[in-house]
Amino acid sequence: MLQKRSVHMAAVILTVCFLIFSACATKTVLDDTDRFGGLDEKMSGSLTAAEQAQALLPEKRIKVGFVQVGHESDWRIAATKSCMDAFAPEQGYELYFVDADNDPKVQVAAVRNFIREQADYIVIDPIVTTGWTAVLKEAYYAHIPVIILDRTIDCKERYYAAWFGSDFVREGELAGQWLQNYLNRMGRGNEQIRIVTINGTLGASAQIGRTEGFARYLERNGNWNLLAQDCGDFTESGGRQVMEEYLKRYPDIDVVVCQNDNEAFGACAAMDDAGVSYGTDGDVIVISFDATRAGLKAVLEGKIHADFECNPLSPPYAAEAIRKLEAGEELIRKNYYLPEKCFTADEDPMTLMIDFEAEKMVTVTEELLEEREY
Ligand code: GYE
C-alpha cells in the first residue's frame, strides 16, 4: 500500500517537474528567438510536444573508451579506481573500460574497437612504449582525441591530445641520489656496494625511465657493483621469484632496488623465507617506487628504507582536459608531470637535489598513512 502510494506520489512530482521544466525550456527558446531576431514565423511559435520532449532530454553523456594496463599492483588498482570516479555516469560520462591484463595486443585491439564504436574520447594507459603509431593515426583521422596517461609512448605528438604522468627518469635519479647520500651518512661511501635491481615490465616507460635515472648514479659511483637486473613485471609474485633467485646466486647483497612497491613486498617475503635481514635494522637496503599506502606502511615499519612516489591519480587530469576540449578551449600543455614526493622513515629527512630543484623528503607517520588517498 505504502509502496503504491509512493509510486503515485513520484508520478505526481514528475508530472509537476515536467510542466515546470517545459515552461522553462519553452521560455529559453523564445528568449533566444527574441535576442537573435529574424527567425521565420514557424520557428518563433511555441514548441511542439516533440520539441519540448527533446529539450527535456538529459544532455548526452560523453563516451570515453579507457584501456588500462591490467591489475598488477596496488598502484594500478588505485589508478583504476580514480578512472571509475573521474568518468562516473554522474560526472556525465559513459565509460567503456578494458583491462588488458598486461597484453599490449589487447590494448591495441581495444583502441580499434573504441574507434569502431565511435567513442568521443579515448584514454590509454599504455603497457609498453612501442606499437602505437598506426592505431593512433586511425583515431586521429577518425577525429577522436586520444589522451595518454601514466606511461609514455613512442609516437609523434600530433597523434595524441595530451599526456599526464610521471617523470620516471627523475624518480630513478632521486633513488640513486638518496642511496649515495645514505651510504655517505652511514660512513659507507667508499665501500664496495653490491646492488641487485628488480625491474618492472620490460619496455614500459616506467621501467625504462627508472632504470636510466638510477644508472646515472651507478656511473658516478665506481664502488657500486650492479650484480644483476631481472624483470619482476611490477608484481609481488614476480618480485619474490626474482629475489629468490638472487639470494641463491649472491649471498652478500647490500641493496635491492625494486621498481615498485609490490615487487618490494615480494622481495621482502623472499628475504624472510631465506632468513636474510633487511630494512633499517637489517643488512639489505630496500628501495622502492610508488609510495602507495601499503608501501608507506612498510617504510614506517622499517622494511623499506626509501619510497619514491609515483602519482596514480591522473584520470581527473584527463577528465579536465576533456572538459576543456568540449568547451572548445585549448590545452595549455601537451605533456604534464604530476606532483610527487619522496618518503622515508628517517626523522631527519634528507633534501635531494635534481637539476637544481630541491626535494625535501617526507617522514612517514601514522597520521600520514591515515590520510593517504591511495
Ligand atoms: O609503478 C607500478 C604499476 O606505470 C607507473 O605500473 C606505473 C607503474 C607503477 O604497475 O606499480
Image (cartoon, rainbow, N blue to C red):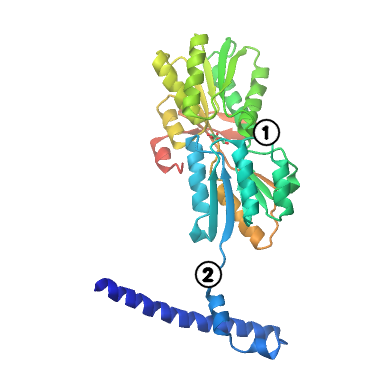
Q: Mark 2 Cα within 10 Å, few/some/many (few <14, many 20+)?
A: few
Looking at the rendered image, the quarter that the N terminus falls into is bottom left
Query: Which residue is painted at 68% across and 18% down in the image?
Result: 219
Q: Quadrant of residue 280?
A: top left
Q: Is residue 244 above or below residue 299?
A: above
Q: Residue type at mark 1?
A: Phe
Give percent across and percent down for residue 240: 47, 22
Give percent across and percent down for residue 119: 62, 55
Query: Which residue is painted at 28% across and 76% down in the image?
Result: 5
Q: Which residue is mark 2?
A: 58
Q: Is residue 71 above or below residue 180?
A: below
Residue 373 is left or right of residue 145, and the answer is left
Q: Which residue is mark 1?
A: 356
- Mark 2 residue element: loop
Q: Residue type at mark 2?
A: Pro
Q: Mark 1 Cα within 10 Å, few/some/many (few <14, many 20+)?
A: few
Query: Which residue is painted at 59% across and 81% down in the image?
Result: 28
Q: Tell which circle, 1 or 2, labels the residue nearer the N-terminal end.
A: 2
Q: Are marks 1 and 2 in contact (CB under 8 Å)?
A: no
Observer-nearest of 340 and 108: 108
- Mark 1 residue element: loop
Residue 94 is left or right of residue 43, and the answer is left
